[in-house]
Image (cartoon, rainbow, N blue to C red):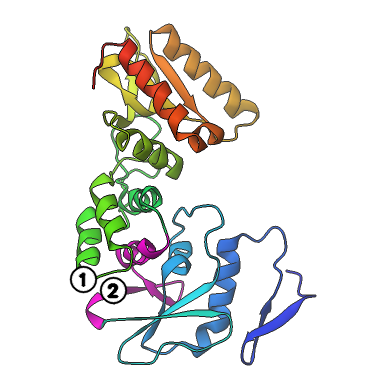
Amino acid sequence: MRSSTLEAPFHGIRVLASAPSHVSENERVRHLAEAYSPRMRDSDFYSHESAARFHDAPLPPHADASLHVTTVRPHRAAQAKGVVPHSIDERAASTMTLDGMRIATPALTWAMLGESFDVAWLVAVGDFFCRVWRFAGYYRPNAGQKPLATPDNLASALNAIRWRGIAKLRAALPLIRLDSWSPMESLTRVHLVTSGLPEPDLNRDAYDRFGVHLGCLDMSYPELKIAVEYQGQLHGRQYARDIERVERLRAEGWIVIQVTSELLKDRTALVRRVRDALVSRGWSA
């Protein structure tokens, strides 16, 4: 790792001021945490967006990349250059050790993010923490892996104290599901259901009339044969496979709505496309 540009945001500790281009924000925050760790007291732990990065949770674009340290009261909050200090009541301080560092548990991390995230992103993070890695179905990655949290865990964290952003947390909790595989799927689903459309099934397998597997659908209304698929940036063979999968579905009578990052930014257009497809298959609000 290059070390030509250095500074000392923590007294006596030197860390990278400008990380190389190949270092992600998550890695950069981990480097900061490792540098600050000698100053951590038993009453301190990494929290908020910093803890979310340790858990590899999805984060919105331009999420805060500062180092957040929370101190259990009555101890005084951390005071150091480059650190965002917080304090918390002991009854809400649920922590764990990860990679040798004390951090907020997934449930506590989620509750802390209510201060800065909107409802849709709180659902996306909650979906990530609560995902059940099921054995059933085709192409299920890491089947049997234990979820990082449960909706009950999140509810307990939410009810421990009165959080900043508690109204958003309360709105997000009932929208969290166990079968969302990506934050973009979560955001798409939230936009649809909060606009009055029926909730789609998540990551359900579809078959043709002969029982041949057509694909695992991000979101679908199986009884109406409507699929809503989020398309990220695809290249080469993966792009070709996805095109072929969509064509197989259409050949079997499915309506396939492909959602891109641009469409996701235009909530009105997204909802209109899905609503039109539902109405065309006989759905009425």
Q: Residue at x 19, y 57 (%)?
A: 152
Query: Which of marks 2 and 1 precedes in the sequence?
Result: 2
User: What is the x, y in percent for residue 82?
Assistant: 58, 80
Q: Quadrant of the N terminus?
A: bottom right
Q: Residue at x 46, y 12 (%)?
A: 248
User: What is the x, y in percent for residue 165?
Assistant: 33, 63
> In the image, which is nearer the foreground, mark 1 or mark 2?
1
Q: Amino acid at mark 1?
A: Ala
* Nearest the eye: 90 or 284: 284
Q: Is residue 109 magenta?
A: yes
Q: Which residue is mark 2?
A: 94
Q: Which residue is mark 1?
A: 160
Extent of the magenta region: 90-116
Please rate how many residues cluster around mark 2, counting C-alpha atoms within 10 Å: few if below 14, some from 14 to 19, many from 20: some
Q: Is residue 135 magenta?
A: no
SS for dot 1: helix
Q: Residue at x 38, y 13 (%)?
A: 254
